């Protein structure tokens, strides 16, 4: 039997957010705690949810689908089926579970669901996350639009840009023989390209191609979803939490033999000098993040890090890079502090402190 309940208008987002829900275990919790923010159609079973969605038009499709993980895990099959329906393009899909099972989290990450929550969880956190996803209608395709909104608050100071060009240009000229040797060694060490390119999010949520010397196996990205749960240095500390914003793998087995040396000496970072010359990032700033990390740092509290320059090195690197006792919140605070307080002299201090920070012990 299906019980459909409509809530009031969402005052936070200024729009009536429609949610289609499936499940009974957490139904009362969702109904009691989210009724002020969302208009929810409750469905007791996956079949009822599928029937409900099948009766919707392009004008009435919900913005969010919340699904409880069922005993037989048929929810994943339903998600795959829904994604084949063109009407469901852009619909936010979030799963909830009463089982603390890492395999479920891994599967959700591999399927690239928008989020996964394991009970007990904070419904206020869930509300904030859903509001964000709806407001920006998935940050991945809208990062360019976000950059237009945010970039007006940050202008690269002329002095900082001159310092970037001087340092990056001088280092490229002086280290070109070293870079040539590294490129040859990578080619001899393992199969694959010399350079690794990935999409990163920098100042004002701008996305750019980020370059490094390849230090990992060619299938490293495919293995990330599983390892982000089992080997993450920033694994969530609170009971019931399922994932953290940052991903940093401890003793990463994806790294090649040469890659261990390149990372330990930070030689793998040298191609980012080209990013600096292009203006994608600065010598000093907050590290540009992979898209899957950036999309999780979107609340008012943490989005400030994107209002400052992105950089090759920064407060995080000279403070506690590679240390086991560094929490996710501590790293976020360092990023926010730099975005608010950066200056020429702070940059000089960070540059001078970067060299000893390169000699880290942990393999992270």
Image: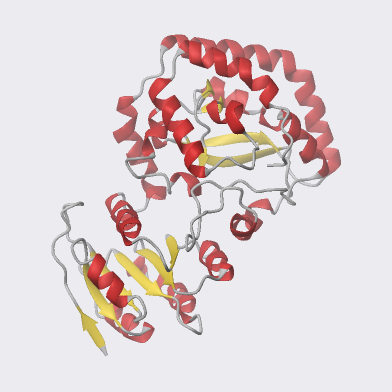
Residue 153 percent location from the top left of the image: 31, 26
Instruction: Tell me the residue at 25%/86% (across/down).
Output: 2
* Colour theme: secondary structure
- Outermost residue on the bottom side: it is 1
Q: Quadrant of residue 298?
A: top left
124 relative to 175 in the view: left or right: left
At 36% from the left edge and 35% from the top edge, which residue is drawn? 147
- Residue 174 lies, in percent from the top left, at 73, 13
Visible residue check, residue 57: no
> Could you tell me which residue is drawn at 58 percent across and 42 percent down?
198
Give the mark count: 0
- Image position of 210 (left or right of 25): right
Question: In which quarter of the view is residue 102 placed?
Answer: bottom right
Query: Residue pushed farthest right?
Result: 188
Residue 323 showing in the rendered view: yes
Look at the picture and state if 114 lies above or below 305.
below
In which quadrant will I find the N terminus? bottom left
Location of residue 63 with respect to 257 vertically, above or below:
below
Q: Nearer the viewer, residue 291 or 245?
A: 245
Q: Position of residue 130 (x, y in %)?
A: 32, 58
Residue drawn at x 34%, y 81% is 24
Q: Nearer the viewer, residue 143 or 224?
A: 224
- Position of 18 with respect to 240 (left or right) is left
Pick the quarter of the image with the C terminus: top right
Q: Position of residue 244 (x, y in %)?
A: 50, 51
């Amino acid at each position: 039997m299906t019980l459909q309940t409509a809530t009031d208008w969402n005052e936070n987002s200024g729009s009536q957010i429609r949610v289609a829900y499936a499940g009974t275990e957490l139904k009362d919790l969702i109904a009691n705690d989210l009724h002020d923010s969302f208009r929810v159609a409750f469905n007791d079973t996956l079949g009822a949810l599928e029937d409900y969605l099948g009766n919707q038009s392009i004008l009435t499709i919900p913005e969010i689908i919340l699904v409880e993980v069922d005993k037989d895990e048929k929810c994943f099959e339903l998600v795959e089926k829904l994604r084949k329906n063109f009407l469901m393009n852009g619909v936010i899909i979030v799963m909830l579970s009463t089982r603390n099972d890492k395999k479920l989290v891994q599967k959700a990450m591999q399927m690239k669901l928008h989020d996964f929550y394991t009970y007990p969880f904070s419904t206020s956190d869930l509300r904030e996350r859903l509001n964000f996803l709806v407001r920006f209608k998935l940050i991945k395709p809208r990062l360019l639009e976000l950059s237009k909104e945010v970039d007006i608050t940050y202008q690269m100071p002329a002095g900082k840009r001159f310092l970037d060009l001087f340092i990056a240009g001088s280092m490229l000229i002086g280290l070109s023989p070293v870079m040539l040797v590294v490129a040859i060694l990578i080619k001899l060490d393992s199969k694959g390209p010399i350079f690794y390119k990935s999409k990163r999010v920098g100042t004002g949520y701008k996305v750019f191609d980020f370059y490094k010397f390849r230090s990992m196996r060619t299938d490293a990205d495919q293995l990330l979803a599983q390892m982000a749960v089992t080997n993450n240095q920033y694994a969530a500390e609170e009971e019931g939490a399922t994932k953290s914003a940052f991903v940093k793998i401890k003793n990463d087995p994806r790294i090649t033999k040469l890659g261990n040396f390149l990372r330990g000496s930070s030689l793998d970072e040298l191609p980012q000098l080209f990013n600096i010359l292009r203006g994608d990032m600065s010598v000093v700033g907050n590290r540009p993040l992979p898209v899957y990390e950036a999309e999780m740092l979107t609340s008012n509290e943490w989005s400030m890090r994107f209002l400052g320059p992105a950089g090759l090195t920064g407060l995080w690197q000279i403070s506690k890079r590679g240390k086991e006792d560094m929490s996710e919140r501590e790293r976020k605070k360092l990023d926010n502090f730099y975005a608010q307080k950066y200056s020429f002299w702070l940059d000089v201090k960070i540059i001078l402190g970067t060299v000893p920070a390169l000699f880290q012990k942990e393999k992270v």
